[in-house]
């Protein structure tokens, strides 16, 4: 895996942080952390989109962010765990992995 795909994965992790922050932030420090997560998340996604197909980057970013947010809700905030949710997350992740595999590694040379 090259560094550009690693940027997409890190961006998705920060996406989970800002989505959780938008729902649960109550103090100025928490809101500040949420804003930092938004900035880092979108910066990394934009950087990756300049080297990889934008549609694939966005789909992977959103897919991983969605899966991470749902799993975080279950683990951290005691959201009920349903087999159906887990199955749908697995399908989502299979689609994300499939997109990554079929997208060409045609990175532009800087």
Image (cartoon, rainbow, N blue to C red):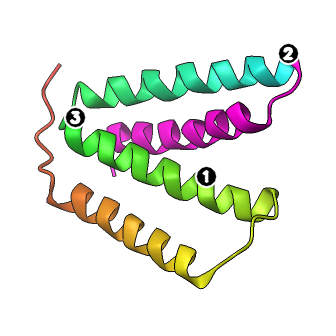
Label 1 belongs to which residue?
A: 69
User: In front: 49, or 34?
Assistant: 34
Asked if labels 2 and 1 touch by Cβ distance under 8 angstroms, the answer is no
Q: Could you give the CA–CA distance between mark 1 and mark 2, rounded to whole angstroms?
A: 22 Å
Label 3 belongs to which residue?
A: 54
Q: Secondary structure at mark 2?
A: helix
Q: Position of residue 46 (x, y in %)?
A: 34, 24
Q: Is residue 64 left or right of residue 5?
A: right
Is 22 drawn above or below residue 6 in the view shown? Answer: above
Which residue is depicted at the point 51% across and 48% down?
65
Q: Secondary structure at mark 3?
A: helix
Q: Could you give the CA–CA distance between mark 3 and mark 1, rounded to whole angstroms?
A: 22 Å
Q: Position of residue 5 (x, y in %)?
A: 35, 44
Which mark, by number, is residue 85? Answer: none
Question: Is residue 4 located in the magenta-colored stretch of the structure?
Answer: yes
First to last magenta residue range: 1-28
User: In front: 19, or 110?
Assistant: 19
Pointer 1: residues within 10 angstroms few (<14), some, or many (20+)?
many
Q: Could you give the CA–CA distance between mark 3 and mark 2, rounded to whole angstroms?
A: 34 Å
């Amino acid at each position: 895996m090259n560094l550009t795909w690693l940027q997409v994965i890190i961006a998705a992790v920060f996406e989970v942080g800002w989505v959780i922050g938008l729902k649960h932030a109550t103090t100025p420090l928490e809101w500040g952390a949420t804003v930092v997560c938004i900035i880092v998340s979108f910066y990394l996604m934009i950087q990756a989109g300049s080297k990889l197909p934008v549609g694939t980057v966005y789909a992977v970013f959103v897919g991983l962010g969605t899966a991470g947010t749902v799993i975080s809700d279950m683990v951290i905030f005691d959201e009920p765990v349903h087999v159906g949710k887990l199955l749908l997350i697995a399908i989502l992740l299979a689609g994300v992995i499939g997109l990554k595999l079929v997208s060409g590694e045609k990175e532009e040379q800087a």
